[in-house]
């Protein structure tokens, strides 16, 4: 390959950017696309990049890679670890890390584009490569759609994408049907009444209100959901107060909710609201809590026929046993919007980035969930090889399967 | 008077400063002291100011006024409301407000100094006026002592001070013995293990750990303290997480604890630690919680004989019934350090700042604790008159009682 | 004395009876009254006994002793420990113990009656001795009033009574004003929906609803009551479910609430109801909780003048320093109804039953609240002497003070 | 049929008996077996009954039906509703109901035995009919094994059994592999220190300890189990205290735990113990909690080949579509012990008892989990027909499939 993918990856990893701030990342992408001789458009959906390879008649295959990092303080100790900082939507200065592998997604996409571009005599059709911003806010895909991607570029006959995951490097994980959960991000502001820390009786303490709410929210999953169904109610952030001796006037919770389908979504949203309102009432709150939606992600549903084709193609390319059924993931994605809104089928798969020996040892010890850092962990650190190569090849094989 | 106390007060109110950052406030003080022809020293205990009026033989009377504001977003709607912001010790940009009346304390002290200065032919002795920083951090008095106030200025024969409070304007509140509670500020960091919001089982959720801890801390007051004894366990701030879909690695609580004496202090600190450690254990935390002390305040104990003298003097000056027993306050003060460390007696009293009609109405309606904003409330707003005048006179009368 | 008070006491202690079931106890009382040659009436207020000593003109002095035991399994290991059982109002077979000292109250009353009867030439007036049932249900005094005690016997000019307490034996504790708290006993039934223990989602789990309610009730005392005011919210019993694998349909809580006065009573009852209803709502309960009152006890308020007379009389009789101010007790009594409803003043005092050396050791070690069993403890065990003698004499001295 | 199965069912329903007390039930069974001319043995595993039909060479097929009722107060309003009461292992007088359908299990078994007995010319082999007691305590199967069923009767070549469930009447539900969850029943006694309800500070309140424990146990399922895995932590009973104004010395919780396999079992038991011990520590308990096991049930695993044969046989007998995959059930069974300990394969299926129209309406309204009473509900009430007939036929068809 002409591109130095390891250098690109470690550079991206060292310089992660928060959602909708991926300007340096876009700069790296366009520099490499230019090196490949490909045209592109920048600023699509604010900070996204799109490039199109038109190669005669045939299907339009969309390849999608997301670009953004996360407000996580990297603790991997890697030589190329991030020390970057950014400003989050609340105006806070925060650490930033590629703790979800989007740097690897971009790297693999660039590698696949080089291969597809160089092999145009072997296929025909159109490849649309979508570098999407702000997946972590669940907002980037919709921003690109709002920016006219379906009008400005050939509409997809199929949407393909891939995500790095803590499977052994070399392994591909995919299943037909629901591959990833639906999700909502919501913000809850609990309104109390502030006052002096020594005079709780003159206040309505929002810290206690918030704590009781968090404890009660646990019972939605533990008591109200069929134990055989997947559901997650995570309070990912809680903030109240500036000083130990001032009882603040309000508390803010941010929740991440996960479910397999839209029925469960409705049920759980209703229960969350019920609990939040009742706990405010238990505190004697004089103002109803404020509940607002940060983002809504549909379930990621893989088209059954296309998934079967992709699985067969990968087994041929990489050997039998390469593709496993990873089960449904409780994580969520906004890649679905590209398929939902265009009516195209979707196949979204995972590829592994964990040293196979380390993985095997953890399986043997029964300590997978403790020893293997997951996405969003400050220790998330894929091995470079063969992760990069398998990511490039997986995307190339998949694209070729659906081109003609 | 030559000083325009209303202008001084509203100026200070408009420009509050956080603890140990009271440089503009010190500038106002020294400007006015200079206008009175008084010498002073700045930068005592970092940002404090001291001035001494030497007027022949006689007792040394210390008058103390604290200077700092609080990280509270003012909501009084007053024309002179604060819109100031500051940077707190954690590096956060926060709103600042004189929500505890220290602007009034400074104003009254300046007025009293003008009166005492102008009436030197009527008394003899020495007045040491101490403008103290950082009372809200419980750190300013000790900083001034560490900076040598007892060596650099005449040591006190008595320490006097006053605090604005939600009594009717005109009223003085004081009692012999324990006037204000002892207090500790402590910080608790709960260590969990971070991860993806959709994969709680791969994490140790510090938000749930914190919520359970807050709920359990309530039982110290509700179950473990004699119902006839005063105790407060306030969690004034709780912070964890940056994003809804990332489970953070830790949560931070700041607690304000209040008690009448040192025995109760030891008991409650032990119980807080017991609860915090046990709740971390209940979560399966792999690291013990980190517990650290922000500040320690002794009880504020008024000398019985001196309090009787002061009460009698104020009754003579302001009329019988002006002085009431306000009971013990659950709030705390660091003024005691000046008395404790010098061996001098202390009298520390309260003076009211609430419109008397509004106060009477609230009493009649039984809604005092709801309708009258307390110290540290974003609505705390003393009426200017006669609050300023009574503050000036109370300090003057008190000083004169102990001078000769 | 002709009565063998130690034998009477140990017999009563061995044979405690639950409220309104004190028939054997009444039999002991009437047997001893007969031995003294006194008339009596049985069955007053269901199981009470009243005897009157008419001795010429003079004040009518009521002496009151309560009779009932408690559903506590005695663990004192005493040779005369109770192994009795009884059937409580819910039909449950329960252990019974004189864990509150009412056996000592009865014993002391009998001794005092012997003394007063034998010394009729030294006083004049009327003594009405009221052996009251069911104090523990807060129901016996009202039952006797409903049964006509004010009509059937001379109405009191003063009501006197005493209670055994963990002070050193020999000591009397009394204070003017509020001596004991007001109290309510309430029952809360939380309605959920039952089902199979493996299918929580098809139920509304009342056990979780009850647990959340108990935790939230803690915040009334910890956050909503002025830290300087006495308040107690105890959940003394919680019952739900019959089997581990059946989620029951409801849970029952019994609460004991304590406050110094009627304003606080109204506030706390409102808060309890608010919390209970909100926690049911948080669970999505389809039926409102059922809240009912078990009993309502007024504060026990000692008449100031009478208390001063009694204190002086006891100091004369037993030596200076015998009478101490025990502070307000958080416990409650129904003796007040006799004073409230007749308009007579009340003096109600405590007398100690703890070995003085053991008490002094615990004071020195700072372990009073741990080492000295309190009323209602399964270890409650007064020393026999001088507890019996001081109880007899205290009642005799008090009665004589108010007779002429 | 000669047996009046409807009369047998309604009689059994009206007279439910608690586990290991099924003597009247055994009497009904033996009366009907005698009427069929079958020999039997009573008192097997305390209150079980076994009958054997020997009919030449061929496989030994065990049919199992459980017999016991539950401590549930029936609220069906049926003319044959139970008003029975029993004494549970704790000595409590409790209501009893066939809330799990074991009366229907016995009825269907009797009907199947009549059919198998009458059709001996159509099959050969041996039928062992096991009427098992105490399934609800998870103890009956092991009691029968301990009593020598494998020695006293022909050992099984296959074990068959069936359970009534809220599927539409007529429907059979069965799946290969794990059909029902593993389960443990455990008892937790939390030790506090009792005392007077007005003096919480002299006690260690076990009610609060229990409430905090229940709330914390919720987080095992909500936070510590992979959201895609089945787990249930139910606190089915909680008991503490006898009276509102006595703080009791201890609280007792009974838990029902459910998991798909033995790894999950070990994890969850460890977490429950961790939470229980930590919450006791948070309360400052002076004695460790007492944790004991009530029963341990293995997962109910259907042999794949045998299940396929059974499904095919039922589809032939009842029509295509009769057999559905009901998914794994979170409930548990002790029937597995007969298969585990003998080494025979097991097929255990469900049959429906809900009016099909009512079921269809609830499906359409999305209110299945609300409107259809589940096993253990006080409203559990199968329609008599065709439930009885389908239960008889299912057992007969299944037995015939494995006989020759």
Image (cartoon, coloured by chain):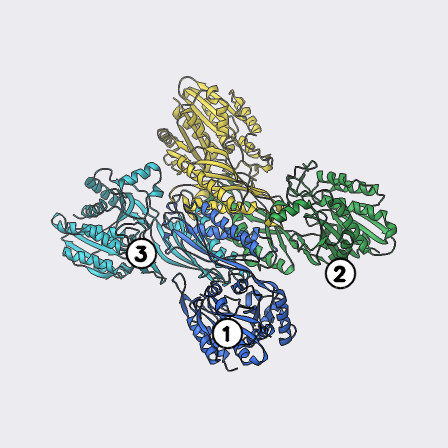
Chain colours: A blue, B cyan, C yellow, D green
What SS does tag 2 mark? helix
Viewer-nearest residue: B95 or A16 = A16
Residue A343 percent location from the top left of the image: 56, 63
Q: What number is the disc on residue A197?
A: none
Other residues around mark 1 within 10 Å, as few (<14) / some (14–19) / many (≥20): many
Nearer to me, D140 or C119: D140
* Cα distance in 3D space between marks 2 and 1: 54 Å
**Do marks 3 and 2 share a chain?**
no
Q: Which residue is mark 1?
A: A52
Q: Are marks 3 and 1 on the same chain?
A: no
> How far from the left and from the top, in percent, is residue C12?
55, 32
- Labels 2 and 1 share a subunit: no
Residue position marked by numbered label 3 in the rendering: B96
- Report how far apart the C-alphas of labels 3 and 1 lie in the structure: 53 Å
Q: Secondary structure at mark 3?
A: loop
Give the side of residue C208 with respect to residue C168, left or right: right
Residue B177 spot, x, y in % from top left: 31, 45
Residue C84 lies, with reference to residue C363, above or below; the image says above
The crowd level at tag 3 (other Cα within 10 Å; few <14, some 14-19, many 20+) is many
Provide the residue designation for mark 2. D305
- State which chain disc 1 sits on: A
Left or right: residue D144 compared with residue D195 = right
Rounded to the nearest angstrom, the CA distance separating label 3 from label 2 is: 75 Å
Q: Residues within 10 Å of mark 2 (few under 14, many from 20)?
A: few
Q: Nearer the viewer, mark 3 or mark 2?
A: 2
**Quadrant where the image shows the C terminus of chain A:** bottom right
Quarter of the figure with residue A307: bottom right
Q: Label 2 near label 3: C-beta < 8 Å?
A: no
Q: Chain of mark 3?
A: B
Pointer 2 indicates a residue of which chain?
D
């Amino acid at each position: 390959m002409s591109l130095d993918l390891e250098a690109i990856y470690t550079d991206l990893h060292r310089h992660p950017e928060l959602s909708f701030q991926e300007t340096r990342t876009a700069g790296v992408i366009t520099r490499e696309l230019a090196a490949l001789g490909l045209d592109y458009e920048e600023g699509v959906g604010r900070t996204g990049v799109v490039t199109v390879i038109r190669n005669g008649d045939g299907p339009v295959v969309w390849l999608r890679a997301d670009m953004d990092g996360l407000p996580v303080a990297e603790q991997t100790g890697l030589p190329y670890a991030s020390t970057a900082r950014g400003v989050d939507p609340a105006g806070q200065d925060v650490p930033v890390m590629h703790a979800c592998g989007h740097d690897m997604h971009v790297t693999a996409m660039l590698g696949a584009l080089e291969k597809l571009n160089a092999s145009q005599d072997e296929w025909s059709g159109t490849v649309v490569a979508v570098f999407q911003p702000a997946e972590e806010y669940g907002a980037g895909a919709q921003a690109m759609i709002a920016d006219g991607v379906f009008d400005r570029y050939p509409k997809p006959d199929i949407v393909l994408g891939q995500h790095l995951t803590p499977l052994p490097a070399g392994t591909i994980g995919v299943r037909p049907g629901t591959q990833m959960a639906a999700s909502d991000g919501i913000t809850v502001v609990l309104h109390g009444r502030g006052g002096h820390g020594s005079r709780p009786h003159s206040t309505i303490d929002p810290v206690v209100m918030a704590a009781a709410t968090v404890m009660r929210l646990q019972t939605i999953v533990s008591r109200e959901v069929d134990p055989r169904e997947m559901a997650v109610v995570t309070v990912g952030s809680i903030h109240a107060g500036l000083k130990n001796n001032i009882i603040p006037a309000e508390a803010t919770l941010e929740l991440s909710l996960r479910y397999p389908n839209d029925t469960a979504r409705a049920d759980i949203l209703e229960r969350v609201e019920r609990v939040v309102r009742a706990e405010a009432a238990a505190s004697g709150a004089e103002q109803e809590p404020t509940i607002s939606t940060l983002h809504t992600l549909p379930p990621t549903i893989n088209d059954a026929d296309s998934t079967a084709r992709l699985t067969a193609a990968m087994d041929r390319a990489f050997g039998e046993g390469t593709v496993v059924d990873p089960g449904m993931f409780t994580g969520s994605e906004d890649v679905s919007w590209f398929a939902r809104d265009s009516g195209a089928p979707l196949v979204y798969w995972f590829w592994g980035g964990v040293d196979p020996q380390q993985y095997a040892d953890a399986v043997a010890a029964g300590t997978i969930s403790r020893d293997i850092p997951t996405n969003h962990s400050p220790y998330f650190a894929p091995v470079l090889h063969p992760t990069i190569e398998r990511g490039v090849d997986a995307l190339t094989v998949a694209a070729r399967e659906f081109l003609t």
